[in-house]
Image (tube, rainbow, N blue to C red):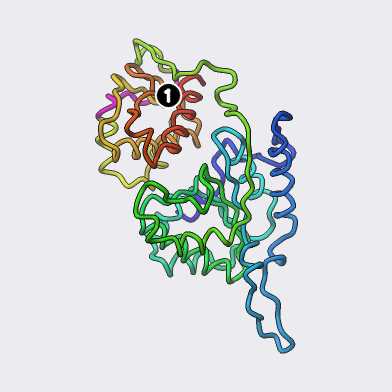
Amino acid sequence: MAASLVPPPQFAEASFASYRPDPDYPSQAEVRDAVEAFVVAGPEAASPRRGLFGRRKAASTDAAAKSGVYLDGGFGVGKTHLLAAAYHAASGRKTFGTFIEYTALVGALGFQGTVDLLRGTALVCIDEFELDDPGDTMVMTRLIKELSESGTRFAATSNTPPGALGEGRFAAQDFLREIQAMSDRFETLRIDGLDYRRRAVDESARVVSDVEGALPAGNVTLDDFRTVVAHLGSVHPSRYVAMVDGLDAVGLTDVQPFADQTDALRWVALVDRLYDAQVRIVASGTPLDQVYPESMLSGGYRKKYLRAASRVVALSRA
């Protein structure tokens, strides 16, 4: 699990130079330059200073606030590209993973084991930062605090500003202190723009009548959509990456809208792994960007569902 904490293949060559900001949205170029400057500054910029006899002076609140950058923006504006560029440009030991991969690491190694593993890392990159339950809130707050105080810096992306994490999902007011303590360690950088994945394609995911006949050559799968969703409930989301490893395409028959939010969220996690691996989707039935009923889209997970919808449009039309 630790060895897999690197950018996905599609971002293996991502750099600040290869990022193409939209001229209609100046914040894209501004954030690119700010993240590059953050990386160039190096870990020394956030390291606690030493006193006359080698003792470390207590880090100021300002120093803690500058121990990370947090890229907040909509879907398809290049946040993950910039996060991967930061990873490639950073010197020293570094890791790159999704939020769920880090929480899975804690589940596998325990909290202290994860701290011991990551201690000494110069830069920890966290993609798709979300807090869906109080347990994750406490774990990530403690992990970021422990590592940042030892000199580790963070770069994170999300569709939600750090101060609003957890909104509408659990009793966030009961955890405001923890959420605020974590968000105070990041400088929030807002990126505006349009979803590049939808600029050149139709608005909906592609649907075919004959899934088997439409599948490309290569390593492919063919399953009923409901069977796949049911199977996801028996596998921890941290293992979804292994499920899609080496696949060229997945075929899904008789796609139907979700009735259960837990199933919908598991599907979102799988879509993220399919997108990371750039696995094509061939499906019949309901277009995969239309499987979330309005009751779900109006709730606290709206942004997750919209991100997944954007990604399946791209994967179904690859």
What amino acid type is highlighted by mark number 1? Ile
Expressed as whole percent of the image width and height from the top left, the position of residue 63 reads 66, 67
Residue 111 left/right relative to 182: left
Residue 166 left/right relative to 33: left
Residue 302, image quadrant: top left
Q: Residue at x 50, y 31 (%)?
A: 278
Outermost residue on the bottom side: it is 53
Q: Residue at x 39, y 15 (%)?
A: 207
Q: Please name whichever residue, 280 or 103, is drawn nearer the observer in this view of the structure.
A: 103
Residue 175, image quadrant: bottom left
Residue 222 on the magenta segment: yes
Q: Where does the magenta region start and end? A: 216-226
Residue 297, image quadrant: top left
Expressed as whole percent of the image width and height from the top left, the position of residue 20 reads 71, 32
Q: Please name whichever residue, 154 or 29, is drawn nearer the observer in this view of the structure.
A: 29
Please give the residue where the numbered disc 1 appears in the rendered image.
281
Answer above or below: position of 164 versus 288: below
Answer above or below: position of 55 versus 42: below
Expressed as whole percent of the image width and height from the top left, the position of residue 129 reads 49, 49
